[in-house]
Amino acid sequence: MTWLLPSVVAVPVLGAGLTVLIGRRLRLQRAIALSGVAFVLVAAVLLLIEADSNGAAVAQLGGWPAPFGITLVADRFAGIVLTVSTAMLIAVLVYAMAQLGRDALDWWFHTKYLILTAGVALSLVTGDLFNLFVGFEMMLIASYVLLTVKTGPGEVRATMSYVVINLVASALFLVVIAFTYTVAGTLNLADLAVAFQTLDPAVRSALGLLTLVVFGIKAAIFPLFMWLPDSYPTAPTPVTAIFAGLLTKVGVFVIIRTQTLLFSQDEPSTLLLFIAGATMTVGVLGAIAQNDIKRILSFHIVSQIGYMVMGLGFLTVAGLAAAILYITHHIVVKTGLFLVGGLVEAEEGTGALDRIGGLLHRRPIIAVMFLPLALSLAGIPPFSGFVAKLALLQEGLALDRGIIVAVSLAVSLLTLFSMTKIWGGVFWGETTEPSVPAARGMTVATGSVVALSLGVALFAGPLADLATRAAADLVDPAVYTGLVLGGG
Amino acid sequence: MSSLRGSAILEAGVITVSGPLLVFSVYLLFAGHNQPGGGFAGGLVAGIALLLAWVAGGMETVRRVVPIRAGVLLGFGLTLAAISGFASMFAGLGFLESGYLEFSVPGVGKVKVVSALAFDMGVYLVIVGMALGLVRVLGEDETLDAEAAS
Amino acid sequence: MAGLLVIHIAAALAILWWRGRVGRRAFLVGSVGPLAVLVWAIFQASGISAGTPYVQRIGWVPSLDLTFDLRVDAYSLAYLLVIAGAGVAIFIYAARYFSDGSRVPTFAATMTIFAGAMVGIVVSDHLLSIFVFWELTTITSYLLIGYDDHKAQARSAALHAALITGAGGLAMLGGFVLLADAAGSYLISDIVSQPPAASTAVTVAWLLILLGAVTKSAQFPFHAWLPGAMSAPTPASAFLHSATMVKAGIFLVGRLGATATATADWWQPVILVVGFITMVIGGWRALRQTDLKLLLAFGTVSQLGFLFLLIGSGSAKLVFGGLALLVAHALFKAALFMVVGTIDHQAGTRDIRRLSGLRRSMPGTFWTAVAAAASMAAVPLTYGFVAKEAAFDGLVGKETTMIAAAAAASILTVVYSARFLIGAFGPHEPGQEPAGPEAPVARSALLWSPLVLAGAGIVLGFAPRLVLGLVDNATVAVTGVAAAGKLVLWPGLVPALGWSALSLAVGAVLVARPPRVDAAVGAVGTLADKLPTGEGTYRRALPALLTFADRSSGILQNGSLPAYIAIIVLVAVALPAAAVVGDLPPLTRPPGGIALEWMLGALIVGAAISLVFVRRRFAVVILLGGVGYGIAGLYAILGGPDLSLTQLLVETLAIALFAFVLRHLPGTFNEAVTARIPRIVVALTVGSFVFAGGLLANTFRGGRAVADSYLAQAVPEAAGSNVVNVILVDFRGFDTLGEITVLVAATLGVAGLAVPALRMLRREG
């Protein structure tokens, strides 16, 4: 297992190298990209199994014991998120191949995609703060260049705000790393957890808040989210879909990791719950004000992040389990929704609600795929979002946090409202002129994501149990430090 | 920049400088484990050499100095670095775990070869590839200049 | 039991699968669902009525207490029979009502799913599984109302229904969780047998649950969605919006009414008041409709109000009357809806003012309507009369105002029943273009389905014993006591009969004088229109919400990158600062450097400050280089020749590349900088924050650092004396692998971005 863990990063990197090396041979590039991501998926599943039976898969790279070398850790939490993420990476890759196959092709798409995969994987499994920075950089540089797959002045301009904001975040991240290393003399997360226990509480909480801001920018929480709805909708669908499904969730993952491991608290964090409520609310208000599928969906990314932060804010096993469940469900559903949005755009040539109509009658298959995803997003049973929201609701009421629960329910209603807006605009209404059917591969890829989201709902029972076990590890930092540093 | 061109003396001078710079960059790569240098610094020196070559003679000269496509250097460098990580696993070590061999070469003495060197060579190649790629972009710029002028 | 739900799903899937070929026969496929339920219910009836509920559990997410616990007792059985009975009749009717069309199968499948969900609600013992099915009915109802999706009116009616019932549903979910929290179980059977102690949480829970029931069952002030829902094709209206879905709320308050009454003393009065207002408003507005379907819809609102207050009251006698009336209502209202459907189908309109001569051309439909309307108006010899007597009987002995209100509503019912019959089958109004059937109704389901239901309303009037056991056992099942109520054709000279007679008599008088009634209705109606209604609130709230959303996101999302950055960095400063402010220890001054360090520091700071003031681009590049070289110098002094070398090389390369790029740009920055002062403030704040943070971190510097171990281990363990390089390729080689990957991506990106950009610049001149 010690080789499997680094290879979730190294194999896609190797693949990226090979795709550049072989040059412009499309079939070979595709084969390399697909097998690279498929490898990560298999590895992720194996790691999750390993983590669930032994607590975590740990690799001390270079043979240096923690904290001297870089440690990679796939605990249950990382295993779950990695598995779901790579499943989406494969689906979107297939979708992209089908779509870009018809467009003027960007030669290095596969390279960038593999680097993105490596960056996501590294950010999830790393056990080292600086290595996390590297993982983020990989993810970001790949996303910068992916955003400009089809370059026009508009795209470059929209990308600007994404790039600049993320550079600011990276700079702040470096500040965090510098401060952290100064006070603790180490960057290994487990080692840091130990070191921080004796740190002055005020300094520790200041550092915790700065960390929250840094990763909060990536996760697009209130009030740091504004860059997201501006920059996401302009990118090509596969790119937006994977960004929407994964990148902000990696941000949330890291927030949860750092806040529980390094800056753990004993009682619910009112600050986090406030952020959660504000994030949900501003996101959904933005969404209902929009009139374009991708723009609506982009605002919902923000809104849904609020629910995950809500689960974290409870800082209990049940709360974190709910957050993990939410992340799992959301990665699938959000990716799927963007793929559906992309299908609509591909067929109609636009995503503007007032220029499309009656798709239900022309392309019922797209409507059938949209419906469960949209309802799931709004938390309507029996779809996956309901289970995750119920978990949050139960824990919120058990902890007597009525306000945030009320906000979350109201936001659910508004989410449903904005989904009916898409439904009414795109699938109902006067039938617009016949369209070009999208490539079959795009539909198949989207369909498999929908099937997976139904699977998440169907197997919500075992998943919830797994999430609970993962959350129990998170609540007690000693579990993580014990696994990495040995002993405990 | 193109005003600098055409000066044979300059071109000759630059080529004279960039040749040794390239050699120096390779030295830095190998010396890196014990003295200042390493793949990163070495690659950067090579990059400056390429830039100089371009200033002096344009893409023609650059191609003469490094007759390889940037993509090949980038791809090979990255592949090499990644493979060197896996290679140590075949030797029974962990990923990227370093081992070294010590043997004596007649006339030179004891030579210590560290497995991390392969990794560092990958780094070097990527940096050189990057520099080459950037110079190529500038070259593209120049071609366009030429087209505009004609 | 679960198998019955599966049958619904399977039927729906089968319809969708063969949607290209099945046509309107899809409804016959769908009818398998209700038919199976009907057969099952009849076979299980005796055992369940004897007091042995049918119980089944299906797990889903056990850790969240989310399971499907099914429990069919006599109360459920009553609803099951209503749903399945009406369902079979309506599905068969629908198979004739529609003509083959590509959209019909989807509609049939949705209605089949709905039928399954409805069954799910009434057989669930688990609060959460009720919620699951409840929301399914909301969604299917949304899809069915919007069937004519090219009409904006249908779409907005569908949305209205979905939002109101959806909001109620979510509130109810909150109530369910609170209630289960207090009671320690999600099972209604547990909650009923061991009610939670009264507390604020329980009060809130009851309120929220009530909100769910009130919205679903179209009670005042949320009733307005139901008339709107009449945009749905008539079979859906008959099934969802009169016979079944709108009774879900009534089902729920009936289930929990007795327990709620016991734990919250406000429950019963609230239920009664809400029910009465709904009843009167609905009846009143029914009088003013000219569309037969809307007339029935408001009639339904009125009847639902009556059922709501009776069944939700938790008192055995009232529940008994309510359940008797529930059966009656399903029979006559579904029949009447189908009659309207047939009229619409044949005559092409439902407008009272235009319909003419239908009595002669559609005699079968006419007599069906007469039978059903008589039952609705509670004319003696119908089952409607029997049931209403039972209801009056329950009310007698309560406050007289309540009976009076019920009587008033009954009078309205008599009047609108008559209005329905006269309007549909009487002559058209003068001045209106008359409309009659273009073709006679063949002996088909269009005739038979309503006839069977309306006929049952007469037969049961003569044989009320057939339902007595059902209603009685159901009452016992939810209230725990027998109501000792009676269902008889002739009740004898009891007070209840007096109220019935009075209602009928006054109603008859009013019917006999239509012009005066119309005038009065018109006068009061104008007045009533000025009162605020739930509908008006909804119509105003929706645009207001959209405007608010638009404005608020316009403010937050103003598209200004500098504003975004300012917010981000200020938050990054404010949050940590707030955490340490107040208990800051004295900061330790770091050890002072040598003179060269100070000089380099001055160079860096000086270059950085000058950057802000220069306007020539090339000067900016040089100054940035100055900052970089200064840092390279600091590295060299602090003992990192490698870093220093690398930094120097990077700076050199960067400056050279900048120089090439600058050729394409104007020599100076031309754009005027706006908001200069705020920018300076933000920049200084962040700068001071990082500076102070560095000092603070230094004050709390820990005693150890992994760097020390690197120095110790580099030569012996990693075989290298250049520690920096050993860190890069060995200790932290994985970082380096990541970084060179970043460089590869960056190079590809630059190539991909710059080449087209350069070409574009060139083209633009």
Image (cartoon, coloured by chain):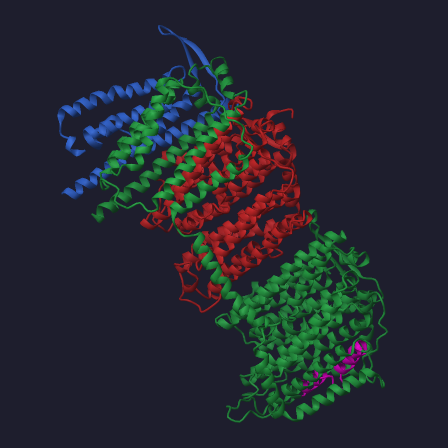
Chain colours: A red, B blue, C green
Q: Position of residue A459 (x, y in %)?
A: 63, 48
Q: Position of residue C705 (x, y in %)?
A: 52, 21
Residue C106 seen from this side: no
Residue at left offset 17%, top offset 23%: B12
Q: Position of residue A160 (x, y in %)?
A: 36, 44
- Give the number of callouts: 0
User: Does residue C678 show up magenta in the picture?
Assistant: no
C55 on left or right of B150: right
Is C49 drawn above or below residue A477 in the view shown?
A: below
Residue situated in front as seen by the camera: C194 or B83: C194
Q: Quadrant of residue C379?
A: bottom right
C274 on left or right of C293: right
Residue situated in front as seen by the camera: C683 or C623: C683
Residue situated in front as seen by the camera: C18 or C402: C402
User: Does residue C368 show up magenta in the picture?
Assistant: yes
Q: Quadrant of residue C516?
A: bottom right
Q: Position of residue A66 (x, y in %)?
A: 55, 24
Residue situated in front as seen by the camera: A136 or C179: C179
Residue B23 seen from this side: yes
Q: Quadrant of residue B84?
A: top left
Query: Dividing the image into 4 quarters, which one contains the N terminus of chain C?
Result: bottom right
Magenta residues, dominant SS class: helix
A291 on left or right of C310: left
Magenta stretch, residue numbers: C367-395
Residue at left offset 74%, top offset 59%: C125
